[in-house]
Amino acid sequence: MTTLTVTFTLNGKPVSLAVDPSARLLDTLRYQLGLTGTKEGCGEGECGACTVYLDGLPVNSCLIPTYQVRGQRVETIESLESLGQDALEPFERCGATQCGACTPGVVMTAWWIREHPELLGTHSIRELMAGNLCRCTGYDGIVDSVAEALRETASGRRET
Amino acid sequence: MKRREALAKLTGRERYVDDLPLQDFLWGMTVRSPPPPRGRVTAIRFGKDIDWSQFVVVDHRDIPGPNVVALIEQDQPVLAAGYVRHVHEPVLLLAHPSREAVRRAVRSVEVVVAPEPPALDFRITPTPERIQYGTDNVLKHLQIVKGDVERALAQAPVVVSGTYETGAQEHVYLEPQGMIAYLEGDVLVVKGSMQCPYYVLKALQHALAREEALVRVIQTPTGGGFGGKEEFPSHIALHAALLALKGGRPVKLIYDRGEDMAATTKRHPALVRHRTGLTRDGRLLAQDIEVVIDGGAYVTLSPVVLSRAIIHAAGPYACDHVRITGRAMFTNAVPFGAFRGFGAPQSQFAGERHMDVIARTLGMDAVELRRINLLRDGQTTATGQVIRDGTDRLAVLEQALALSRYREKEREHAAFNATHATLRRGSGLATFYHGAGFTGGGEVALKSRLRVAGRPDGRVEVLSANIEMGQGTLTVFTELAATRLGLAPEDVTIAEADTARVPNSGPTVASRTTMIVGGLVERAADDLRRRVGLDDSARGAAVTQAIERWHREHLGEGEPLFGEATYEKPPGIAWDDTTYRGDAYGAFAWAAYVAEVEVDLRTCATRVIDFIAVQEVGKVLNPTLAKGQVQGGVVQGIGWALMEECKWRDGAMANNQLTNYLIPTSDDVPAVRVAFLENPYPHGAGGAKGLGELPIDGPAPAILNAVARATGADPRAIPLTPERLMELMDNAEFGMRNAE
């Protein structure tokens, strides 16, 4: 079978690996690299469970051929682990996670909003989170968590 | 207490079935029957482009025991044996080390079915050539009779009739279903996403003809269930196990979303007819109700869903003359199954929408109609259950009205609707109830058992078959055991739901886990305390030290230390399953929900702009978890009411993808404002009653009542999509013309 060699930056470290030309970034991350924090919810870019950052922008990794990310920066939920417990405290406290299947994707989008608070000048948290489907929380727990995280960042109480 | 496993989930460290490391395994997949929905399988053709010697291929002849997925009736085959009753029936199983190869192989198998006349509409009487179950395709018939309905209707000054319909709903748990199976010596191990490990164990034992000691079922962290992982996982477990047994290697069988939506169960579609006799001032005199549900091509849990549907159909109201007739119909649709609410959302949608239809017919206020008819303590439900729990159901209603500013909003909406060119606003109400735990004698029959073990380090471990799927079992059980024994939460662990280790504490369904199984946690903790020589007042360090001391004294004996509890029926509960009379549930939770909607007359799109959910659920054990259950249930209910529509082709879902089966996003719904009234239930753990299902009963009727008030239209069916509302408004010559 034909394979292609792809080199990209994954969570800050260079990786180079042989992939099937049709491999999805989601499968490469999960099955080839063992990064199972990124989940598959729908496989067609609707649910956002597979959200990763590609050159700093959130994308659905089920829609990205791995070959396409050559030379780019890919960051997964595993890159956020270094943030530590404190940073995620509002998400625990406000009930952002129930079953957890959507959660890594939700946290990736939420973190991106937190890093780009200027977006809230033109968009609501509900609009910005609409690409991440959740079937458990009814979204209040998620929206409240993002608002709390933003508040704490703004007040500088939890610098991360 | 914060959710126990929250941090693992937030950081992606929680490992679901598809995340588990597995060596040298095969990917399994299922070959399913194409249309037509019913007929004999006349040929199975294997594509010539595939080297089949590289694949494990399983058909019905490879099943060691009876070809049946054991459940209520023994009617559903593990794999079709020459005849199919619905589209997507599993026919063959394939496995191969490459997932891509097995996908290609599945596509290259052609299953040919010789068509026979299918039954595809549960609402119409089947013609003789379409009858496939009994003499009339009725899977189950049930009836509740209280008083003399015909006489009461004949004498009633007013009779109001109505017919209501609800559609199927797909669970859309975010983690698709999946299982892993492998042999560990002689023991078959099956791991996966499931609500009921012992259901899976029983099904494996039966069809594989294996004794219990040679089967072990382990639940993996489960990414949502909502009932969809109650009975269906037994099928996938059997399929994975058959492939693993034949292939001699571990097998992983994970559905993608398309297969999950096409082949697994959904909420039963329902048709409900009401004929209600009343006094002119709105007092209920007689309720004659007919509930028909679509069971699909196999029995699954339809008889029990029907039971819960009819028991809840009359609503939380006092009425002396009630007749409720229920039928679950066989059709050649993909079988319907358990879904949060389990029949009660369907029958209460009809009942609560009908209350507003009655109010409009009588020219009466919809709140007042409910207020005068709501059950008071000492009055009886349709099954004759005397309600005497001391809950002030009127207070529940009043609080919902107050929090939603219901009366002020009525005036504001009138002013808004009189002036706005294209938008219409309205508020709608639903008052409802949900019985917690198994119906009637169900809990007694289950004989649930649970253990709390004392470990050598003084910590305790809860051993139960009840699982975490997002609703909070791990956290609530930890809190209950810690509170009971005066321990810190860190001193309590919850065992993995592994049938080789945990006793059968029953399925994780029916809003029973906290209320009923939680009670077993408390009593098993008491028993543990007694076994180490303490009385029920001992707490904290005294308990820890006694456990440690016990282990020192029994060192080397290899004897485990545990306390045990078995379900005991609360006193004064009696149910007769033959007459359908008596105490249907140990306890009911009560609720009043108010939805405020805005309808755009140009598009007929309905948006919920405010939602108030007030309920009495006994003592709230964990406010964050409880609120999350209500908010999640309400939003799932908003989806069912307005947007979630299964499109059917040959009895199978044609829109089996999230691109065109739409569930609510964060931007489709408002904040859901939640309030609890607490009246501790003496027989529930910590005073709690069941909570998980209640919140999906109320949103649909509240929303449709709101749309009716906003627009003057009279919607009777859900989902009320823009297309459906537009049709209603056009027919009634509403719409823009009416707006002038």
Image (cartoon, coloured by chain):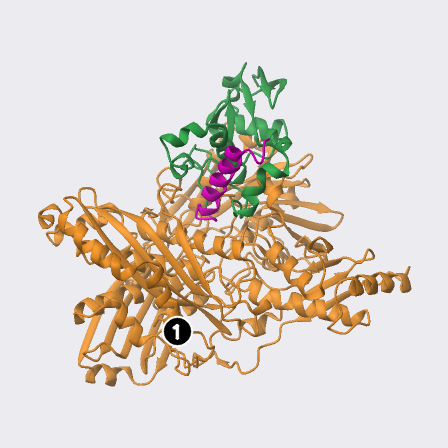
Chain colours: A green, B orange
Residue B176 shown in magenta? no
Q: Is residue B465 visible?
A: no
User: Which residue has dot 1 on it?
Assistant: B142
> In screen coordinates, is B204 left or right of B550?
left
Could you tell me which residue is drawn at 55 percent across and 60 percent down?
B70
Amino acid type of the residue tagged 1 in the rendering: Leu
> Magenta stretch mostly in which secondary structure?
helix
Residue B702 at x, y percent in the picture: 31, 59
> In screen coordinates, is B635 left or right of B90?
left
Could you tell me which residue is drawn at 76 percent across and 65 percent down?
B562
Could you tell me which residue is drawn at 53 percent across and 33 percent down?
A153
Which chain contains the residue that carries disc 1?
B
In the rendered image, the vertical position of residue A72 relative to residue B626, given as above or below? above
Mark 1 residue crowding within 10 angstroms, few (<14) / some (14–19) / many (20+): some
Q: Secondary structure at mark 1?
A: strand
Residue closer to the observer: B401 or B172: B401
- Where the N terminus of chain B falls, by quadrant? bottom right
Residue B451 at x, y percent in the picture: 71, 64
In the rendered image, the vertical position of residue B506 relative to residue B445, given as above or below? above
Q: Is residue B87 visible?
A: yes
Residue closer to the observer: A60 or A84: A84
> In screen coordinates, is B649 left or right of B433?
left
- The picture quadrant where one finds residue B347 is bottom left
Residue A28 at x, y percent in the picture: 57, 26
Residue B375 at x, y percent in the picture: 37, 77
> In screen coordinates, is B479 left or right of B397?
right
**How many labels were placed on the picture?**
1
Residue closer to the observer: B618 or B523: B618
Magenta-drawn segment: A136-160
